[in-house]
Amino acid sequence: MAAKRGMTGRRLELGIQLRQLRENCPPVEESRSRGMTRRAAVKGLKALSEASLLRVETGELNFRRNVGDLRTLLKRYGVTDEALISQLVELNRDTGNEDWLTQYRSSMPTGMPHYVGLEAEATLISAYHPTVVYGLLQTERYAKALFEVQRPVEDNTSEFITRNVDLRMERKKRVLTREEPVQLRVILGEAALRIPVGDADVMVEQYNEIVRLAKADHIKIQVLPFKRGYRASNDFAILNLGELGARVQTDNAWGAVSTSDKSREVDRFTRRFDTMVGLSLGIEDTIEFLEQLARR
């Protein structure tokens, strides 16, 4: 199973198993009846801090540079099964299937490389954006116009814009047209379609692209009209990763991408999304709405 996962999926699986082993191993601290804290787990390991172990357990890091620390942790967790040890060491090995991201990393905000890896593992993505077209639905011209609008404020270079547009188009291709494409559900606030980005031709092309995508079997797009009751004020995406659980993603005001696998957070955003589904136009009505915008 591990061999079929991408690099991010392998890290997630490794992290989940390590966290379970740590939380259920024989206790070493007097205050605990079972398991150990991260502080106890990394004690004496110079190259591994509590923060680093947390990132390992959430799938953001592995032991690429020091597999010895992985073996030490497994020993501290009381793991003696050689088959399990070999399985976890194998999960720790990097694969080359995300090498394409390397050329973009320098222009990606904090947390973005990890999120792009999660996209590749997702079986279902449920996304909402109130004010701009969701990234995986964007055309190249719309994406470029969007970055150009931000350029004077964010002080972005032409190279930065080109790289980010290319990255967005590559993500779109890899997620939506792969052999087993993700099931994508998107809710767009009406403002995302009314606020002009670029000239009229850019917007018409974007409307037509959303219509094209909405007709695909694995993509469902709905518009949440003005004055339709509850709406979330910030954009977010919920990624269902199958056996690896679910993650919710949000952007913060500094541009960093944050993800959480905490069930209460995933449940909270799922409730928000499901509520807006009931308030949004149906699939066919959404397509008709977009076609009318394109004709104006």
Image: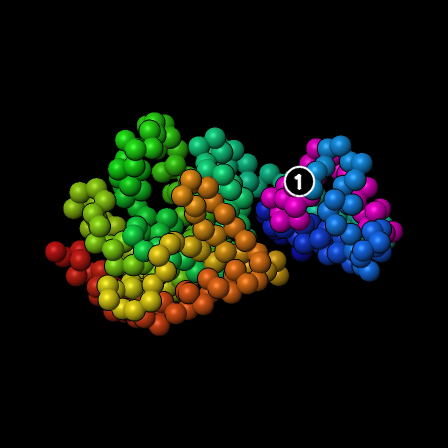
Side of 80 where 260 appears, left or right: left
Kindly identify the residue that appears in the image at 44 percent across and 56 percent down.
237
Q: Residue 116: x percent and y percent? A: 49, 45
Q: Is residue 222 above or below residue 26?
A: below
What element does badge 1 sit on? helix
- Residue at the outermost right position: 80
Residue 21 showing in the rendered view: no
Magenta stretch: residue 7 in it? no
Residue under the point 17% across and 55% down: 294
Image quadrant for the C terminus? Answer: bottom left
Q: Quick one: 203 or 264, which is closer to the camera?
A: 264
Q: State yes or no: residue 53 in magenta.
A: yes
Residue, x 81% and y 55% (percent of image)? 31
The disc labelled 1 sits on which kind of residue? Ser
Quarter of the image holding residue 89? top right
Going by the picture, which residue comes out furthest to the left?
Answer: 296
Q: Nearer the viewer, residue 149 or 28?
A: 28
Q: Which residues are magenta?
A: 51-80
Disc 1 target residue:
52
User: Where is residue 154 shown, x and y percent of the image?
Assistant: 33, 33
